[in-house]
Amino acid sequence: MHVGVSTYHTNPDDGGIAQYTLSVLRALAQRPSDFREDRLELFGTEAARAAAVAFGADFDAMEVPPPQSTAVSLGRRVLGNGRLRQAATALHQYRHRSHRRDPSALARSNSAGAWLRDHGVGLLYAPANSDLLIESGIPAVITVHDVQHIRQPHFQEHIDDGYWERVEYILRNAARSATMIIAESETGKADLLECYAEHGLTPDRVAIVPYTVPPHVRADRRDQEATRVRGAFGLPERYVFYPAQFQPHKNHIRLVEALGLIRMRTGLRVPLVLSGAQNWSLAADTWRTLMTTATRMGIAEQIHYVGVVKNEDMTGLYAAATALVMPSYFGPTNIPLIEAWSLGCPVITSDIRGIREMCGDAALLVPPSSADDIANAILAVWNDDSFASALAARGAARAELFSPDRFADALWAALRRAKASV
């Protein structure tokens, strides 16, 4: 069989999707014996090809399909900005009747899909939401990382720029027609079935492939990288770390408030190192709100922003940190927790569905809405080295559940199931 892998997300600006994509490319380099006779072809960017080559992947070729004839949702075409869509009372009815069309007609007019079919692709996989997969007319496997736009639709990032409609267009049609959908956990699978069983998704078409530590995380260079990165970025000797895009659901504001409470109550100044892009309007707005809050709480000088960092710097940023503090409202699982565990960095994160199952006893779990609880958790790790060490040790043990080999085995098993059903 000719298996095509379509990926365009390898830039650090893409956040967790880029990390996941690199893990996929590394896993695909471990081609099992029962796929040796299949043609495995990568369709994507030059960066994706370079990464695949670095991992030793034996892809047969790497090409970029022509632009596809992607359907544009009514919400984006007519209502434009998501704030107008949110205000439109007619949208409720639109949401419940739209996205029901079968994309087979689009497949006939989709130039990229036709190009792939002409190439003989018999199974197409993408590690993130993809219009191409549902419009190509080719049997497809797609990774769906979460359905938070359904579970928590009130966040601004789900409202702006037609995001809700685009994701629903992809996922409802994937529920009907995808050969296999990959979820990252049992919770993720349950979410998918709860939201999309009515659109045709069945349990046998959902495979579970748990996340893994990305390739650029180097536990063998932990100490050297901690020293190098601390000097390169001018970081304090101790700090808490939160690598995340600046979006409301990431909950930076509660973390900043927690640090303000610590300073107000104890006089302790805990530095916070943040990374992530600010190159779109919502991120810039979130950053401004964060810094306004920090100034109000009297801790602006404790914020150290390092921008979008190179993959090779992430090892040191975790290794030098006293703790990862990730009070995100979103799950079901999050890759930074695995990165921190693998590098001996204690984890403080949200006590929410999915995350608590992911962490077990390997993290301090706090209600993400409570600055008080976040502050208390930070103090527990900051002030007690033995407790922090024990927490880090439990994290290291937990990281074994998310090893690259387990990820590769699960991904190939999902592709094997899909291949057998085509």
Image (cartoon, rainbow, N blue to C red):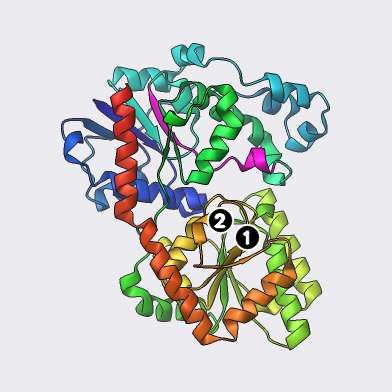
The stretch in magenta equals 139-152
Q: Quadrant of the N terminus?
A: top left
| Residue 355 marker | 2
Q: Is residue 239 above or below residue 146?
A: below
The amino acid marked with disc number 2 is Ile
Depicted 398 relative to depicted 390: above or below: above
Apparent side of residue 396 relative to residue 92 in the rendered image (left or right): left
Residue 262 drawn at (x, y percent): 72, 80
> In the image, residue 99 lies at what x, y percent?
62, 21
Residue in front for this viewpoint, 233 or 331: 331
Note whether 419 is above or below 414 in the view shown.
above
State the SS at label 2: helix
The residue lying toward the viewer, choosing from 311 and 184, is 184
Residue type beneath disc 1: Asp
Q: Quadrant of residue 93?
A: top right
Where is residue 257 drawn, in percent x and y?
74, 70
